[in-house]
Image: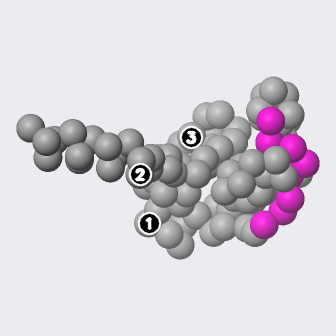
Amino acid sequence: MKLSVVYKSTKRSDTYLYVAKRDDFERVPSPLMKMFGVPKLVMLVALTKHDKVAGIDTQTFIDKLEKEGFYLQLPPKQENWLEEHLEMQRLAAL
């Protein structure tokens, strides 16, 4: 069974770092670790038990984890409701 260890960023909300082994950040670039802050252990994920991990296909996730040594999950892009509202008003005025 393949596992991944999940850490939460202490500097950025909803940002998670996945590595293959606990406390193994050797392959994570140092600028990324500096931006991420002190990793806080969240959980272990059994990769073979899920169709998707971190929002992507499990096999794609495993490939990225093996190739790069880590996977960084960023929060989804937040919608700008003001811009959307202004665009709707502009279109309605046409």
Disc 3 marks a residue whose amino acid type is: Lys
Q: Is residue 40 magenta?
A: yes
Q: Earlier in the sequence, mark 2 or mark 3?
A: 3
Q: Left or right? Give the position of 72 relative to 85.
A: right
Number of labels in the image equals: 3
Residue at 64% in and 44% down:
71
Q: Tell me, yes or no, whether the two marked residues, 2 and 1, touch with CB atoms within 8 Å.
A: no
- Can you identify the residue that label 1 sits on? 51
The residue carrying mark 3 is: 64
The residue tagged 2 is 81
Boundaries of the magenta span: 35-42
Residue 55, position as x, y percentages in the image:
48, 57
Q: What kind of residue is marked 1? A: Asp
Q: Residue at x 64, y 61 (%)?
A: 2
Label located before the other in sequence (2 or 1): 1
Q: Is residue 21 visible?
A: no
- Disc 3 packing (10 Å; few <14; some 14–19; many ≥20): few
Q: Is residue 85 visible?
A: yes
Disc 1 is placed on an element classified as loop
In the current view of this chain or complex, which residue is farthest to the front? Answer: 93
Q: Residue at x 42, y 47 (%)?
A: 82
User: Badge 1: few (under 14), some or many (20 or more) residues near its Cα, within 10 Å?
Assistant: few
Mark 3 / mark 1, whichever is N-terminal: 1
How far apart, in angstroms, are the residues tagged by discs 2 and 3? 33 Å
**Relative to 50, residue 94 above or below:** above
> Where is residue 28 shown, x and y percent of the image?
78, 34
Neighbour tally class for label 2: few under 14, some 14-19, many 20 plus, Cα within 10 Å: few
